[in-house]
Image (cartoon, rainbow, N blue to C red):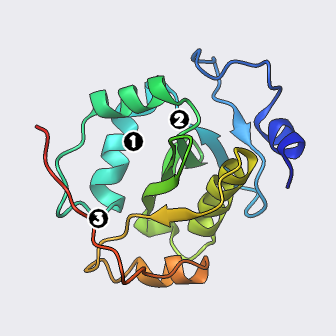
Amino acid sequence: MGSEDYRELMGSKDKSLAAEPSAPPELQAAGRDDLSYRFAVPADADAVMTFWATAAEDSHRPPDSPEAVLRLIARDPSALILAVDDGAIVGSIIVGWDGWRCHLYRLAVAPTHRRRGIARTLVSLAETRFTTYGGTRADAMVLDDNTDAHPTWSAAGYTPQPNWTRWVKSLA
């Protein structure tokens, strides 16, 4: 998919995603017709937190907050992609592009909706965004002990990189 296709997928290049629309813009994605995929908007912040509390692996990370979700959306309105089923969030992925590297975070699917291709679709939408911007390699933050997630990432073509160790420092 080329950049023109991506612009068409995301809507007109001139259309601002920074302003909160009355209805969040939907993304076109191959997969289940009963689900929609769209960028998160500020009104989603609390629902995203509720979703992550039940669907995301949260050990080993500082606590998230609705304010952090709002900061993410304000900085990059295309960074948080949601899968929605009948108005309820059932999947998420954070698509981090810093102009140099492509980073994936917070891939999560509701336990009631797993094994339906939602994660695969979210990763595909993220990868499309990256290639449109000229990204050449994506990395995914996956905890070593989150073994439930490993098959999902392997199926998407990702492999652990044994020669790297992630170094972290809490700033709060």
The residue pinned by badge 3 equals: 57
Q: Is residue 53 above or below residue 151?
A: above
Q: Position of residue 100 (x, y in %)?
A: 55, 47
Question: Three-letter amino acid code at disc 2?
Answer: Ala
Q: Earlier in the sequence, mark 2 or mark 3?
A: 2
The answer to whether mark 1 and mark 3 are in CB contact below 8 A is no
The answer to whether mark 2 and mark 1 are in CB contact below 8 A is yes
Quarter occupied by the C terminus = top left
Q: Dot 3: few (<14), some (14–19), or many (≥20) neighbours within 10 Å?
A: some
Of residues 54 and 170, which is closer to you in this image?
A: 170
Calculate the distance from the C-alpha at mark 1 to the C-alpha at mark 3: 14 Å
The residue pinned by badge 1 equals: 48
Q: Is residue 91 visible?
A: no
Q: Is residue 48 left or right of residue 6?
A: left
Q: Position of residue 26 (x, y in %)?
A: 71, 38
Q: Is residue 126 left or right of residue 93?
A: right
Of residues 112 and 98, which is closer to you in this image?
A: 98
The residue pinned by badge 2 equals: 40
The answer to whether mark 2 and mark 3 are in CB contact below 8 A is no
Q: Is residue 54 above or below residue 73?
A: below
Looking at the image, which residue is at 46% across and 23% down? 74
Helix, strand or loop under label 3: loop
Looking at the image, which residue is at 55% across and 29% down? 77
